[in-house]
C-alpha cells in the first residue's frame, strides 16, 4: 500500500495560490476569446496572441469607421479594464511565488533545471515535498501521468500513449517547460543534448517533448529526494 505524505501548511498554502492563479488565467483566456468574437462579428480580426490583441485594441477603439457602435466601444473598453485588473492579480501571484523561490533552497535548486521555472518549482514542492515518498524518478513520472500505458498479450508488451493519470496541472507545466527548453537543450553537447538530438532524428517532435518532460520529472526527483544540485555535464569532442 502506498501511503500519502501529509502536507505541511506551507505546501497547502502554495497549492491554494496556484489554484487561484490558474482560475484567473482561465478567466482571462475566456475574456479575451469573448472580446475577439465580439469584434469578429463586426468583421474586425486581430492576429493571434494576447500581446498582439492588447497592442491593437487602442487603434481599433480610436478608429471610428470600423463599424463599432458607441455602446459596443464602451463595452470593449470595460472588458479591457477587467482584463487589466486580472493581469494585475496574476502578476501579484507571480511575484509572491518568485519571492518564495528566492527564500527556499529546494525551489532554487529546481529552477536550475532547464525547463523548470518558478511556477513548476513551487508547484512540485507543494505537491511532493522532498519527493522521498517516491522510491525512484520513474514513480514520480508515473504519478504525473508521463509514462506510456502498456498493453501486454502473449508475453509481448506494447507501449501506448502516456497514461495522463495523476496531477494534470503539474504535467501541463512540465510539458510546457519541456517545449520551451527543447530547442536550446538539443543544441548543447551534453548527454541530455545528444539524447534529444537522437530522439528528434527518429520520433515526432511532440513525442520528444513528452519524453523530455518525463526526463525533467526524474531529474527533479533526484534533486529533491537526494538533496543534489543539477549540473549539466559537457561532453568532450572525439
Image: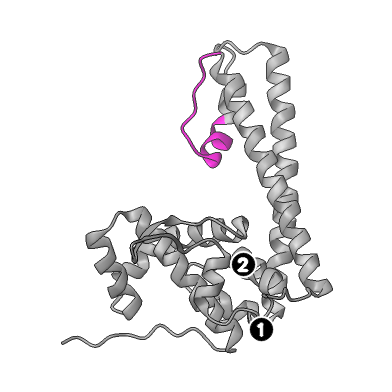
Could you say where residue 94 lies in the image, as x and y percent from the top left?
69, 60
The residues tagged by marks 2 and 1 sit, at their Cα atoms, a distance apart of 13 Å
Residue 159, visible in the rendered structure: yes
Q: Residue at x 73, y 14 (%)?
A: 71
Q: Residue at x 53, y 81 (%)?
A: 136
Q: Residue at x 48, y 35 (%)?
A: 48
Tell me the number on the disc at residue 10.
none
Judging depth in this view, the residue of 4 and 45 nearest the camera is 4
Could you say where residue 133 lies in the image, as x and y percent from the top left?
65, 80
Q: Residues within 10 Å of mark 2 (few under 14, many from 20)?
A: many
Residue 194 sits in which quadrant?
bottom left
Quadrant of the snapshot with the C terminus: bottom left
Tell me the number on the disc at residue 118.
2
Q: Verify CB contact (< 8 Å) between mark 2 and mark 1.
A: no
- Depicted 60 relative to depicted 180: above or below: above
- Depicted 89 relative to depicted 110: above or below: above
Residue 7 sits in which quadrant?
bottom right
Residue bounds of the magenta highlight: 42-56
Of all residues shown, which one is farthest toward the front? 154
- Depicted 174 relative to depicted 107: above or below: above
Residue linked to disc 1 = 105
Judging depth in this view, the residue of 141 and 112 nearest the camera is 141
Judging depth in this view, the residue of 175 and 229 nearest the camera is 175
Tell me if residue 54 is in the magenta stretch: yes
Amino acid at each position: 500500500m502506498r501511503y500519502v505524505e501529509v502536507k505541511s501548511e506551507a505546501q497547502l498554502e502554495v497549492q491554494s495560490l496556484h489554484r487561484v492563479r490558474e482560475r484567473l488565467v482561465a478567466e482571462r483566456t475566456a475574456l479575451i476569446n469573448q472580446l475577439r468574437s465580439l469584434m469578429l462579428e463586426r468583421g474586425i480580426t486581430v492576429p493571434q496572441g494576447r500581446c498582439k490583441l492588447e497592442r491593437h485594441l487602442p487603434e481599433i477603439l480610436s478608429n471610428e469607421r470600423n463599424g463599432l457602435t458607441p455602446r459596443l466601444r464602451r463595452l470593449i473598453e470595460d472588458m479591457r479594464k477587467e482584463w487589466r485588473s486580472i493581469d494585475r492579480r496574476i502578476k501579484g501571484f507571480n511575484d509572491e511565488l518568485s519571492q518564495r523561490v528566492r527564500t527556499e533552497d529546494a525551489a532554487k535548486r529546481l529552477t536550475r533545471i532547464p525547463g523548470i521555472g518558478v511556477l513548476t518549482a513551487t508547484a512540485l514542492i507543494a505537491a511532493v515535498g522532498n519527493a522521498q515518498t517516491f522510491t525512484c524518478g520513474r514513480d514520480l513520472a508515473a504519478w504525473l501521468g508521463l509514462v506510456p500505458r502498456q498493453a501486454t498479450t502473449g508475453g509481448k508488451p506494447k507501449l501506448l500513449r502516456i497514461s495522463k493519470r495523476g496531477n494534470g496541472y503539474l504535467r501541463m507545466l512540465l510539458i510546457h517547460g519541456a517545449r520551451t527548453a527543447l530547442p536550446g537543450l538539443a543544441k548543447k553537447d551534453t548527454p541530455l543534448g545528444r539524447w534529444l538530438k537522437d530522439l528528434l532524428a527518429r520520433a515526432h517532435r511532440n513525442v520528444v517533448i513528452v519524453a523530455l518532460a518525463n526526463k525533467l520529472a526524474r531529474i527533479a526527483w533526484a534533486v529533491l529526494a537526494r538533496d543534489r544540485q543539477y549540473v549539466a555535464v559537457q561532453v568532450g569532442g572525439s
